[in-house]
């Protein structure tokens, strides 16, 4: 498949002379590999009866969540993190398969073994995607693009799955590129085209810009990379805090982050700053539910569970408190997590000031790319559940 911004070899990302203004001259060669509908594709590979049919991996119960959807299911609008009931309404013929994380992890190890043949600098983001820095490994291959082509071919031949890849001079652009021609696609973003590629994209496509941030940007009149680039570092810092510097650089196709080999995830979490303060019990519980769902979604998608749940609450005067509970077994299921959340919230009620922010973090992680042992809990509370 042809990439929208794929350019001929003389202007490859391996050519330092093609660097635009503002990009460091010592350009890296970064590949981002992203497996196509990984969990669903593994299930279709292992069960011929599922091939060519709409498949969802995840909970089959009414309150279950879709962890992954095959491309046949995506044509009906079925997406990961969607409630199973909603997915069934969109696709009545949808076939649900329970997750097999042990299998997914084993396949992921096979794929990472292939990566290791080309570079030691591999930074897994989850079971199904990783950054590779091949800057110093080009001898014998000629270019990062050639290495990406070889890796994709080996994954298809040895693992029986397809992978999409993005090749560029930094992590930010490589990740954008890998999503450009899915499934089974390759996209190269050269240094000369990096800024133009970013300028044309909706900011919601930027890695690090979630739905809430995208909405805040929309209210500020920022819809595309070009809109973002029009604002000063001071403006972005005022509205987005420390992330403003990242957005300023990203809008220019600049990303100085290095590929960090074998980085392990210590926690997953989500928090929300409210437009107006929350006061009542029902308002607080409603405000925490998006964080509960985000933790479940990310944990399920990455094959991760955890034993420690931490509640973060920030009052209107910016005073912040945290409360944690560590369980003997990993937390699983929405009802269990909600029960722990309510137990953490109870000692803080009734509240004396309005609440401007609520968040949850799951740590002491197990499975997926979690670091063994996980993060230490902020505070232990002897609460009955």
Image (spheres, rainbow, N blue to C red):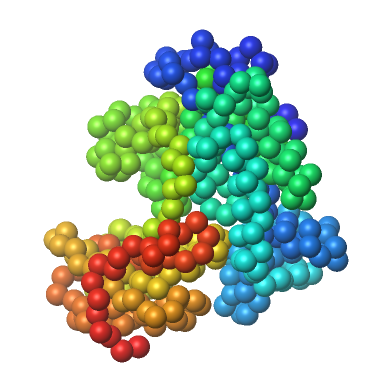
Quadrant of image for the N terminus: top right
Q: Residue 135: image x %, image y %?
A: 52, 25
Quadrant of image for the C terminus: bottom left
Q: Is residue 41 visible?
A: yes
Q: Is residue 127 left or right of residue 291?
A: right
In depth, the one of 210 and 368 nearer the eye is 368
Q: Is residue 357 left or right of residue 129?
A: left
Q: Residue 54: image x %, image y %?
A: 77, 62
Residue lying at 30% horizontally and 28% vertically, measured from the top left: 232
Up/down of 5 relative to 354, above or below: above
Residue lying at 37% horizontally and 79% vertically, measured from the top left: 327
Q: Residue 99: image x %, image y %?
A: 64, 69
Up/down of 54 relative to 88, above or below: above
Residue lying at 22% horizontally and 63% vertically, measured from the top left: 314
In depth, the one of 143 and 310 nearer the eye is 143
Q: Is residue 75 left or right of residue 355?
A: right
Q: Is residue 321 left or right of residue 199?
A: left
Q: Residue lying farthest right?
A: 49
Q: Residue 224: image x %, image y %?
A: 48, 34
Residue lying at 42% horizontally and 31% vertically, measured from the top left: 255
Q: Is residue 86 visible?
A: no
Quarter where residue 41 is shown:
bottom right
Up/down of 314 relative to 159, above or below: below
């Amino acid at each position: 498949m042809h990439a929208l911004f794929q350019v001929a070899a003389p202007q490859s990302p391996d050519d330092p002379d093609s660097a635009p203004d503002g990009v460091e001259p010592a350009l890296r060669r970064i590949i981002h590999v992203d497996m196509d509908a990984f969990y669903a594709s593994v299930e279709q590979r292992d069960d011929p009866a599922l091939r060519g049919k709409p498949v969802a991996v995840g909970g089959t119960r009414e309150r279950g969540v879709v962890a992954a959807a095959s491309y046949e299911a995506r044509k009906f609008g079925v997406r990961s993190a969607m409630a199973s009931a909603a997915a069934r309404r969109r696709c009545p013929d949808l076939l649900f398969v329970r997750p097999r994380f042990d299998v997914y992890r084993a396949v992921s190890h096979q794929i990472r073994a292939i990566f290791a043949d080309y570079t030691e600098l591999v930074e897994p983001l989850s079971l199904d995607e990783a950054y590779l820095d091949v800057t110093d490994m080009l001898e014998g291959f000629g270019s990062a693009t050639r290495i990406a082509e070889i890796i994709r071919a080996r994954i298809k031949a040895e693992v029986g799955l397809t992978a999409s890849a993005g090749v560029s001079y930094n992590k930010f652009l490589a990740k954008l590129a890998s999503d450009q021609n899915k499934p089974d696609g390759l996209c190269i973003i050269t240094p000369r085209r990096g800024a133009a590629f970013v300028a044309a994209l909706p900011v919601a496509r930027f890695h690090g810009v979630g739905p809430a941030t995208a909405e805040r940007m929309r209210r500020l009149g920022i819809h595309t990379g070009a809109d973002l680039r029009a604002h000063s570092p001071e403006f972005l810092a005022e509205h987005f805090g420390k992330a403003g510097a990242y957005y300023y650089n990203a809008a220019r196709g600049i990303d100085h982050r290095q590929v960090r080999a074998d980085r392990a995830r210590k926690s997953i979490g989500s928090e929300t700053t409210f437009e107006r303060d929350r006061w009542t019990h029902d308002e607080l519980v409603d405000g925490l539910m998006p964080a509960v769902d985000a933790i479940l979604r990310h944990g399920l998608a990455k094959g991760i569970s955890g034993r420690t749940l931490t509640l973060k609450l920030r009052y209107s005067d910016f005073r912040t408190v945290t409360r944690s509970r560590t369980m003997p077994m990993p937390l699983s299921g929405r009802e269990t997590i909600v029960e722990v959340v309510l137990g953490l919230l109870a000692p803080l009620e009734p509240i004396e000031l309005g609440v401007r922010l609520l968040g949850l973090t799951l740590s002491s992680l197990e499975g997926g790319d979690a670091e063994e042992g996980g993060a230490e809990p902020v505070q232990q509370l002897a609460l009955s559940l």
